[in-house]
Amino acid sequence: MGSPRARRKPVAAQPTRGERNCAWIEEHCRVPEGRLVGQPVKLRAFQRQVILGIYDNPSGTRRAIVSFGRKNAKTALSAFLLLLHLCGPEARPNSQLFSAAQSREQASILFALAAKTVRLSPSLSQYVLIRDTAKQLACQELGTLYRALSAEASTAYGLSPAFTVHDELGQVRGPRSELYEALETAAGAQEEPLSVIISTQAPNAADLLSMLIDDAATGADPRTRLFLFSAPMEFDPFSDEAIRAANPAFDEFMNRNEVWQQAAEAKRMPAREAAYRNLVLNQRVEARSPFVSRAVWEENRGVLVDYAGEPVWLGLDLSAVSDLTALVAVWKTAAGTWQVRPFFWTPQVGIHDRAKRDRAPYDAWAKSADLLTTPGATVDYDFVAARLLDLASEWNIAAVAFDRWRIDAFKKALSVAGAGDSFLELLTAFGQGFQSMGPALDALERELLARRIAHGGHPVLTMCAANAVVQADPAGNRKLAKDKSTGRIDGMVALAMAIGITSKADAEPAPGITFL
């Protein structure tokens, strides 16, 4: 007879809590979108790492921070975790679940992905009720309810979340978020609440997510788990090594060609590098940088050709004292190149002092007529208005985009110079914020990268291009920031408005321009 030890059947190891949750996701969830849509979820190694790290923490997890670059299926992972707590092994009867985002659009994305997962799953669709209008999922058998919230803090008070996903918390600027604080405070009423923060990094160390990451990195609270995938700053930012460090899905399901294209554009266009580092490499880098590199600007010097009757769009950036007043005209040739004609004005009084302060040869440019001067200590709009009307008599002007600042004074100068109502109707207000300037800068950037801008190397405009700095909002929209620039950028503001207005303006000749 053999020994009892030899006859004893091996006892299978019991799955951990995290392993059980991974198995449930793979059994019941379906891929919500992409080329594998509808197929059973197969968790990748990094996704399993996150789930096991959250649920197998010996100290218990109160807060988990998951941060990597965009397009790594963060939102899909959030949806799977939500369903775990709504109708899976982590569900508690009658519990409230929430996802929190900074905008209604972002909040809708997570809800939509969770709803798609439910609809595609034969098992989940039997138990989960989808309320599209209210952005809710409900498991009536368990009495659990999930709601998507946006940054309206008042809606969060009076709630008692057992589970919360803070989606893209890196979009919060500064150290506080009322929505985050309201939900975290409300969770205190639960016995074992869990909050999961899934986001790319915030750009500044003083932002809320940065402070939470830095605190988690100390290990002071064992109930906080940190999963940070970020490219070290010493890495070549355009290397595969850097990209892989921040994007665990790079070799799994990411569109590599798209990422490499983003890297190539960031390498060529300094304005793209900071956003690329932040969003793709998940580095703590403020999305603010020069708009165009000197190399790309020089590639667009081009050949200036004579005007041949094409529709002309203009951008006007007015000034008072220290700034330059800039008027930039653009028209498109039959070859598809934008011809750029800039005009600049500055007060005659104090020009030498401003030249020293700005480290720019304003006096020399005035002698060469690249920079026009007006009498006195402020720009005299009468001179600008007269020049604009002269151009109108020579060119087929489609629209004049202007910054609303001081425009009333300029319209008065136009009227005094003889502009009729038909001409004044060509003046088109153009906002300087992210909403208007974002698309304009995108359009200008595309043309610069395609070498379809011919500026002829105008010295004042070239100076403005070298000084132009962009600032991005949390959604990635950009604007030119005068307060962030080290020198005058007025010419680039006017150029961006001129290019931006081309998509809005009527290209047909404007009828009936009259002068009184």
Image (cartoon, helix red, strand yellow):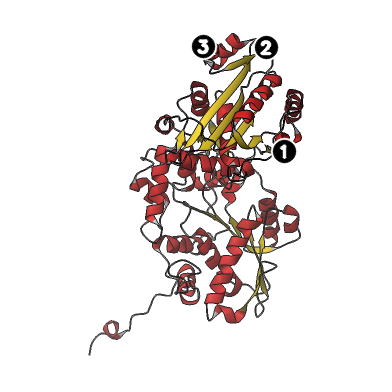
Residue at numbered disc 1: 425
Pick the residue in front: 324 or 466.
Answer: 324
At label 1, the amino acid type is Glu
Residue at image position (63%, 55%) is: 101
Tell me residue 294's x, y (percent).
42, 29
Answer yes or no: do the residues labelled 2 and 1 have beta carbons within 8 Å?
no
Relative vertical location of residue 75 with respect to residue 9 in this rendering, above or below: above
Q: Quadrant of the N terminus?
A: bottom left
Neighbours of disc 2 within 10 Å: few (<14), some (14-19), many (20+): few
- C-alpha distance separating marks 1 and 3: 37 Å
Dividing the picture into quadrants, the one containing residue 234 is top left
Residue at 37% over, 46% down:
242
10 Å crowding of disc 3: few (<14), some (14-19), many (20+): few
Label whose residue precedes the other's in the sequence (2 or 3): 3
Which of the pair 420/167 is nearer the observer? 420
Q: Residue at x 45, y 30 (%)?
A: 305
Q: Which residue is mark 2?
A: 375
| Marks 1, 3: nearer the viewer | 1
Q: Position of residue 23 (x, y in %)?
A: 45, 73
For marks 2 and 1, give the one nearer the viewer.
1
Relative image position of residue 53 (x, y in whole percent):
47, 60
Helix, strand or loop under label 1: loop
Indicate the amino acid at tag 3. Ala
For numbered disc 2, what is the local secondary structure? loop
- The residue where tag 3 is placed is 364
